[in-house]
Image: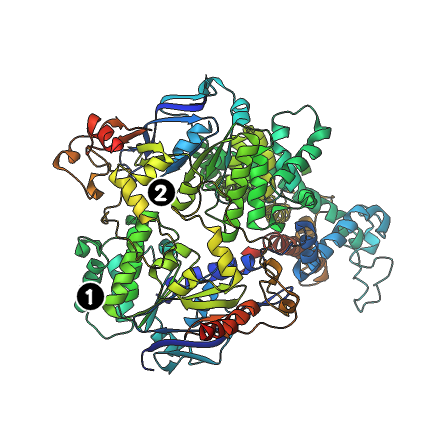
Amino acid sequence: MTDVIKTPVGGQAGSILSSGLDGVLEPSPGSLLRKRIFGHAGLMIGGGVLLIIFLMAILAPVISPGDPYDQDLSRKLIPPVWHESEKATWEHPLGTDLLGRDYMSRLFYGARISLLIGFAAMLISGVIGTTLGVLAGYFGGKVDMVVNFIITTRLSMPVVLVALAVVSLVGSSLTVVIWVLGLLIWDRFAVVMRSATQQVRGLDFVAAAQSLGCSNRRIILSEIMPNIANQLIVIATIEMAHAILLEAALSFLGLGVQPPDPGWGLMIAEAKGMIFFDAWLITIPGVALFALVLSINLLGDGMRDVTAPENRN
Amino acid sequence: MSDKILEVQDLTIDIPTPSGTLHAVQKVSIHVDRGETLCIVGESGCGKSLTSLAIMDLLPRKATRTATRLEIAGESVFDIGERRMSDIRGNRMSMIFQEPMTSLNPAYTIGDQLSEALRRHKKVSRGEARDRAVFLLEKVGITAAASRLGQYPHQLSGGLRQRVMIAMALMCGPDLIIADEPTTALDVTIQAQILHLLAELQREFNMGLILITHDLGVVARIADRVAVMYAGQIVETGTAEQIFKAPAHPYTRGLLACIPIPGQTERGAHLGAIPGIVPSLVGRMPGCHFASRCPEVRDSCNSAPIPQFQGAEPGRSVRCLLADEAAVRQPAQEGAA
Amino acid sequence: MSEIVLEARDISRSFMISQGFMRAKRPLHAVNGVNLKLHRGEVLALVGESGCGKTTLAKMLLGLLPPSAGSLELDGKPLASLSHLEVARIVQPIFQDPYSSLNPRKSIGSIITLPLQVQGDKDPASWRQRAEEIMELVGLPRRVYNNFPSQLSGGQRQRVAIARALINRPRVVICDEPTSALDVSVQSQILNLLQDLRQELGLTYLMISHNLAVVEHMATRIAVMYLGRIVEEGEAEAVYNSPRHPYTEALLGSVLTPDPSLGVPDTHLGAAYPNPLDMPSGCSFHPRCAKMMPQCAQQAPRPIPTESGHVECSLYKENEAKMRMTS
């Protein structure tokens, strides 16, 4: 019973708080946002790590100590520099792999592939999912029914199995992996954007825009979209991390990035045989993948916190 | 006095915010006698709802509450622990909220919720609890009460839900009812009915009633005594008669000028207005909180805190320097006449 | 009487309401045969309880919802023949809650100039100036042009909403509870502003409200709505001083004037709340009516003309209504 009574209390106190400050001319939303971004540890850490990985990918040709494709069996399996081994050399700071390729260079170039696949797959799924979700949420009725049917159909398909089947049928390449993932993981976009749109659609400013004679197109693009953008960004980060992990899984199974390209999932797969002898070989790409996914998720959580602080609890 | 149901002295509520401490309620003192209706009236953000939540000990966690005295029926309830407090809450005093839909649990029937309210505090059988529920539902004007017990909140209209809330608040036979904007979400005809009902039940059960509202019409019709709040402070107290016939604080006068009164205000004429905005309660304010909007402001208003001046009659007080002068002057004039 | 800017002829609107899984849908008659004339320069107040169809009627008058029967005329032209943009130039709404009626992501300037953009105004260079003119008219400081709604107080936001509605100089403004979300001291400022604007710009208002004190203050005519029908309509003075319909009487009796010598009134309405899904037979008000007669449950009353409008109640016969008004 106490719960029943307590429920409205928080809400009321919140409104009291905000209306108590009602008269104050608050700083603009932009400057408030900036202040909150820099005050959010998770967001700063996530953003920082992501920035480092991004720079690694961009600057790979410049900062790589060697050529990621250059094989030399005479210098295979050199351990990284912190290893207490005579073979460890600053020429290969992270050592070399089974085929004698510089591991650090492969890691840097692999970052390009992970980021590219994650970003492109997120973009494709984002466009599909957002379009479906916003249309369903805005128009409701029959459109909503159709979209819901498509979403349920999609949700009934196991992503990894379908991806495996398609890739093994069509053959694997970067483009195929991107499209397969993009076409498969839009469901969360659609679901979240649909309910977000439904919420915003019920607000009076949408009715105001309608009675001003605004077209549906204008209402969706300039009234509704800006108000659901923060949720879109959060979903986008989650789905990007999701795509990167899926790609790693596909590569691990041999159906993603094909050798000799340096994908992180592929590097883990190639190193799995050496897990008991040269554990660093699997640890390094593993840690990199972990750091990337974690940083993207931290960034997404942080974005949600700073753009909608009232939802934090 | 054994008649005092509630006695609050110097209640202060502070809420930490990123930009500093928000002094939401500042040294509020109120008391309610048995069978008496106290209305706390004020605009949004004046601290009236927080005051009631503080009495019920239902403040949000980050808010801090201090008071020199907080007694319910002679028993101090200050820092007595959550267990004892939840015993008093609902049993000796209950609260009626503005939005009956969110205050009732949608997953349980009306009958379950009513019985639960009683059985949590008193050792009674299921049957007895049910009988009391039916008795009270009939009391609050719900026909076919027995058949309503099995219904869920969503099956009732807003007015019926608020009646159920009132019945629930009455289940334990409390000494004090706090109603926070109980009729704001309702239609006018239903508002009148619910207020009528509240007033009737309060007389019948001889309870204390605190009604929190922004609606001066409601206040005038139902209150015995009135406390006007502005920006965290009580600025004026008095009987309803005194407040409405001879408002002493410029804020009270301003509020009364703002509302159109059928039959009195000239149709279409300009209404009174209080220019400006409520000051921020973050940080300390040296003088009168209303100074920035007051039409009669003077230099002395901004320099020092304004005390609550006691009026000639008991229970009458005003937080205004001008009223102080008037009060001093008034007895002298009477003496001369 | 001056020209008619908006006229509704016998308009109705029903919705199909789902009764739950596998059950047939039932019609909800939100608006049921409403006749309404809005004369230039008047303030017509539409009063009634929630669920009586006020909002549905307003949506139809704004052209946002087509009526399922009947016809609407705007400025003498059938509303159905006008485009959305043409309707928007003539009728504009002001909403109840200024916290939800302004897009939080847009600056005040772009909110106020949106109507100019939408109408494809040819002279974008003048937008800023026109926005500032209208801001001055509604009492908004120019410096808030680049601010966002969250930086303004409730009263200021409502002024922004009014500025947006008026920048294209519409002829009719539909105010849906324009002050009920505001504090008392702000409410009076907005009401004063609406009065001034009406005189200055020659506007016609349709005010939807349940606050009868506000209605009495603002309105020149009053229409009382109950369960989808207008049960009484007439000049404000006449309706206030001698209400004919028992429902109007109950509504007026529920107004709580700040007079401590009076108690809480008893409206004698009973606890039978109206349910638009389950309309009573005959006169839809009869289950709550204090003056119910036997025939009320069978026979729906017909509109009886009064000196300034009409009433729908079986208490009155054609001549009787006229008789009462002469006395």
Residue B94 position within the rendered picture, expressed as x and y whole percent measured from the top left: 34, 68
Look at the image and tell me in which quarter the C terminus of chain B lies: bottom left
Residue B99 or residue A220, whichever sits in front: B99
Q: Which residue is mark 2?
A: C50
- Which mark, by number, is residue A168? none
Q: Is residue B64 left or right of residue C6?
A: right
Up-down relation of residue C231 to residue B245 (above or below): above
Three-letter code for the amino acid on which mark 2 is drawn? Ser
Which chain does tag 1 point to? B
* Callout 2 and callout 1 share a chain: no
Residue at the spot 19% in from the left edge and 64% down from the top edge: B130
Which quarter of the figure has residue A4? bottom left
Q: Say how the picture is coloured.
A: rainbow
Three-letter code for the amino acid on which mark 1 is drawn? Arg
Q: Secondary structure at mark 2?
A: loop
Which chain does tag 2 point to? C
Q: Quick check: marks 2 and 1 in contact, CB under 8 Å?
A: no
Up-down relation of residue C214 to residue A143 (above or below): below
Residue B331 position within the rendered picture, expressed as x and y whole percent measured from the top left: 47, 74
Dot in front, 2 or 1: 2
Q: Tell me the crowding category of disc 1: few under 14, some 14 to 19, or many 20 or more residues within 10 angstroms, Cα based.
A: some
Residue C194 position within the rendered picture, expressed as x and y whole percent measured from the top left: 52, 39
Q: Is residue A225 left or right of residue C320?
A: right
Residue A157 or residue A231, whichever sits in front: A231
Q: Secondary structure at mark 1?
A: helix
Q: Is residue C320 left or right of residue B270?
A: left
Residue at the spot 45% in from the left edge and 19% down from the top edge: C80
Q: Which residue is mark 1?
A: B132
Up-down relation of residue C260 to residue A160 (above or below): below
